[in-house]
Image (spheres, grey):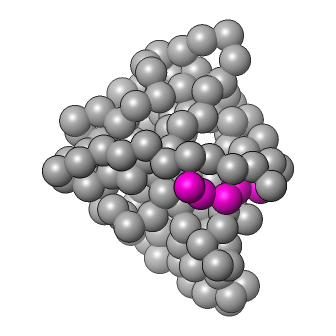
Amino acid sequence: MILIESEVVRQMTSHCMKDRPFEACGLLSGKGGRCETIWPMINVEKSPYSFAISDEAIEKAMAQMKERGEALTGIYHSHPTALPYPSKEDQRHNGYPTVAYFIVSLQGREPVVRCFQVTPSKVQPIKIIQT
Ligand SMILES: [Zn+2]
C-alpha cells in the first residue's frame, strides 16, 4: 500500500485535467515513503498517448526534494482516453521501478486514480490510502 495526502491527489487530478488532451506527468515526494508533495512536470512529448520528462527538470525537482528532507516516493501520469492501467510502453520506459506508479484515467465522467509497482517484467497493483 501507499500513503498519499488527499490534497496531493486533488492537485494531481486537477493537473491532469488541465493538460488534456495531452498526457500530464509529475513526481511525488515525502518522508517515510509517503506522498506528501507534488511536483507537476512538463510532458515534453506533448502527446495524448505518451509522456517524457526532461532530465534537467527531474534533477532540479530532486535537488529541491532533498532540500526539504524528502525523497522521491512516486511518479504519476494521466491517460486522457484510456483505462488507469500501465501500457506496455509505460512498463518498458519506467525509469523508477522502486517508487509508486500512479495513473490518472480521465476516460470516464470522474477521474480514476490507480497505483502500481511497475517493472519491465511485472505490473502489480498497490492499494492507495489517502490521509
Ligand atoms: Zn501510460
Residue 65 seen anywhere in this rendered image of the structure: no
Q: Which residues are magenta?
A: 1-5
Q: Is residue 73 above or below residue 23?
A: below
Taking the spot 69% from the left edge, 50% from the top edge, the residue there is: 129
Image coordinates for residue 80, horizontal then vertical, percent: 51, 22
In this picture, residue 129 sits left or right of residue 2: right
In this picture, residue 114 sits left or right of residue 69: left
Image coordinates for residue 115, horizontal then vertical, percent: 51, 44
> Which quadrant would the C terminus be assigned to in this image?
bottom right
Taking the spot 38% from the left edge, 67% from the top edge, the residue there is: 98
Taking the spot 45% from the left edge, 64% from the top edge, the residue there is: 99
Image coordinates for residue 49, horizontal then vertical, percent: 36, 27
From the image, give the main secondary structure of the stretch colored magenta: strand
Q: Is residue 24 above or below residue 21?
A: below
> Which quadrant would the N terminus be assigned to in this image?
bottom right
Taking the spot 53% from the left edge, 60% from the top edge, the residue there is: 74
Image coordinates for residue 51, horizontal then vertical, percent: 39, 42
Residue 113 seen anywhere in this rendered image of the structure: yes
Q: Nearer the viewer, residue 1 or 16?
A: 1
Residue 126 drawn in magenta: no
Q: Quadrant of ligand 1?
A: top left
